[in-house]
């Protein structure tokens, strides 16, 4: 950190203390501004960008408490250090509650003040970097970055634009790869919480024994391995949005806790008894049919209605094939930029093959296919030679029988077991994708897996 670029404002009515502090900080290489009272300090703070404010707590005209409050309203990310009398614990606590970064007590030595200032400046730099990253993410995930011009996608965009202006709970429904998280980010970064955190958690990717701790946090010693206290995703997202992906995988006991959180707007860490108030917008997503899961007693009906205040259904790519050329062009440019390759052209015949393919992996599969073609392309134009074989010759697509019945008798259960085994292999054991591919419910798939010993 270059200290000569760091500007520190000191507010203290004690001339001698102010001059000593000014000398010590200048000697350490910082640029220093001084004020004799709180009102003068606020005037400087309002007109001159400073990296840190050091203020005495007791001053005439304007107290340190008032300066802390009014400076925080102007710029909440500038760290403020409060000077208090020795042993004045009550003042120190009040200062920290008021938003002070830290406090130092009189009399203080040079090393103590320099160390506190350095920590405060590092904190300020971290906040500035977070603000920069939020701005970049906001630009990357604004609603306009979601590609699609079909009638179904225009309806989705209209709905998203409406809910983004509100704080309503949203449930995004759609197959894997349709872009549910991208839509969730579009809602958040186009909405009233855009400058606050967007926190995502995949409920299916975390073991059932750990997901409660991930969501709600835990106290030190709450369970074996909890060597220090930890915030959960709800606290991390406080003020912003929590995106619960694959909500259908959430265990039933945890669904009950989530319902209470939505009702009370408070959470309790594991190992604690005192609830903590939170202010979080919930956006959930699912690739399962939750109404079917409700019938099977695998999902709470009351939670469903709490989440689906506004349901948004994302159509699979096969239902909006007119978007394929637009998406392909988008991914061509994106992949070329990513790999430092000159932008490529694409032959019309390639689009025809894309139109005829089922795209069970939806937009994500199309993006992966285009990226692969760009990376392996030998010419400046993508041709049929660059198209993967399974897309060029979609013999195993839906609507095409990929085998002929033999003349001799067959065992239907053996064939069914083999089809399920191959489908599971295709989707890496993902039961939801496999069930959808086979046109059955997930519970029906699990029943057949148990029946044929495919667990």
Image (tube, grey):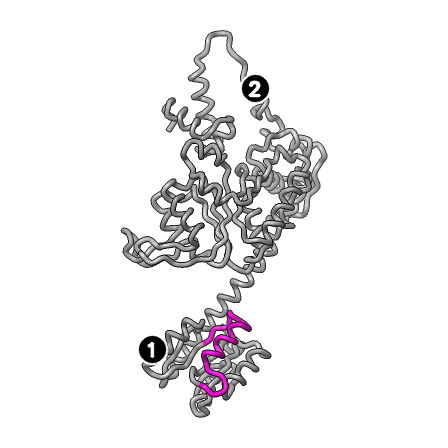
Query: Are the residues tagged 1 and 2 within 8 Å (C-beta)?
Result: no
Residue 100 in sight in this render: yes
Q: Which mark is residue 297?
A: none
Q: Residue at the spot x=48%, y=76% of the render?
A: 68
Q: Residue at the spot x=44%, y=35% of the render?
A: 294
Q: Quick one: quadrant of the C terminus?
A: top left
Q: What is the magenta range? A: 59-80
Answer with mark 1 or mark 2, whichever residue precedes in sequence. 1
In space, the residues marked 1 and 2 are separated at their CA atoms by 78 Å
- Looking at the image, the residue that sits furthest to the top is 408
User: Does residue 131 lie above or below 346 as drawn?
Assistant: below
* 66 drawn magenta: yes
Mark 1, Cα crowd under 10 Å, few <14 / some 14-19 / many 20+, is few
Q: Position of residue 142 (x, y in %)?
A: 61, 53
* 62 drawn magenta: yes
Task: Write down the quadrant of residue 94 in the picture.
Answer: bottom left
Of residue 411 and residue 85, the one placed in the foreground of this image is 85
- Using residue 251 as the reference point, say whether residue 399 is left or right of it: right
Q: Which residue matches tag 1? A: 89
Q: Position of residue 255 (x, y in %)?
A: 40, 43
Q: Which residue matches tag 2? A: 401
User: Does residue 225 lie above or below 148 as drawn?
Assistant: below
As helix, strand or loop, the secondary structure at mark 2 comes to loop
State which mark lies toward you, 1 or 2.
Answer: 1
- Using residue 236 as the reference point, say whether residue 183 is left or right of it: right
Mark 2, Cα crowd under 10 Å, few <14 / some 14-19 / many 20+, is few
Q: Position of residue 397 (x, y in %)?
A: 58, 26
As helix, strand or loop, the secondary structure at mark 1 comes to helix
Q: Position of residue 146 (x, y in %)?
A: 62, 46
Q: Residue at the spot x=48%, y=79% of the render?
A: 66
Of residue 96 and residue 296, the one placed in the foreground of this image is 296
Q: Residue at the spot x=41%, y=47% of the render?
A: 258
């Amino acid at each position: 950190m270059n200290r000569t670029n760091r500007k520190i404002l000191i507010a203290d009515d004690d001339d001698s203390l102010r001059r000593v502090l000014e000398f010590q900080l200048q000697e350490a290489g910082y640029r220093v501004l001084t004020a004799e009272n709180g009102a003068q300090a606020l005037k400087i703070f309002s007109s001159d960008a400073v990296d840190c404010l050091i203020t005495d707590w007791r001053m005439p005209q304007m107290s340190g408490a008032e300066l802390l409050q009014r400076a925080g309203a102007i710029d909440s990310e500038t760290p403020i250090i409060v000077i208090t009398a020795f042993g004045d614990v009550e003042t120190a606590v009040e200062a920290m509650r008021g938003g002070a970064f830290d406090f130092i007590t009189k009399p203080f030595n040079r090393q103590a003040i320099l160390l506190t200032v350095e920590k405060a400046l590092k904190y300020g730099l971290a906040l500035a970097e977070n603000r920069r990253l939020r701005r970049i993410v906001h630009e990357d995930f604004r609603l306009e970055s979601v590609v699609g011009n079909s009638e179904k996608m225009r309806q989705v965009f209209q709905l998203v634009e409406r809910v983004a202006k509100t704080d309503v709970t949203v449930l995004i429904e759609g197959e894997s790869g349709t872009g549910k998280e991208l839509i969730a980010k579009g809602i958040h970064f186009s909405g009233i919480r855009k400058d606050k955190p967007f926190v995502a958690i995949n409920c299916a990717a975390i073991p059932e024994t750990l997901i409660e701790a991930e969501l709600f946090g835990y106290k030190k010693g709450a369970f074996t391995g909890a060597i220090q206290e930890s915030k959960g995703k709800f606290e991390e997202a406080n003020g912003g949005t929590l995106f619960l992906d694959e909500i259908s995988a959430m265990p039933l006991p945890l669904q009950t806790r989530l319902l209470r959180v939505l009702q009370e707007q408070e959470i309790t860490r594991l190992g604690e008894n005192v609830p903590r108030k939170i202010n979080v917008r919930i956006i959930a997503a699912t690739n399962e049919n939750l109404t079917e899961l409700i019938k099977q007693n695998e999902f709470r009906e009351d939670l469903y209605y709490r989440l689906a205040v506004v349901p948004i259904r994302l159509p699979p790519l096969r239902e909006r094939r007119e978007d394929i050329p637009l998406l392909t062009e988008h991914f061509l440019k994106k992949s070329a930029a990513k790999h430092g390759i000159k932008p490529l052209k694409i032959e019309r015949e390639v689009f025809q093959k894309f139109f005829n393919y089922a795209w069970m992996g939806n937009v994500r599969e199309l993006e992966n296919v285009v990226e692969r073609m760009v990376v392996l392309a030998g010419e400046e134009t993508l041709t049929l030679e660059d198209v993967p074989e399974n897309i060029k010759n979609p013999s195993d697509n839906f609507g095409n029988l990929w085998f002929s019945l033999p003349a001799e008798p067959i065992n239907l259960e053996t064939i069914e077991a083999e089809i399920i085994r191959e489908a599971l292999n295709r989707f890496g054991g993902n039961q939801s994708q496999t069930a959808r591919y086979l046109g059955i419910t997930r519970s029906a798939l699990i029943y057949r897996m148990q029946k044929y010993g495919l667990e």
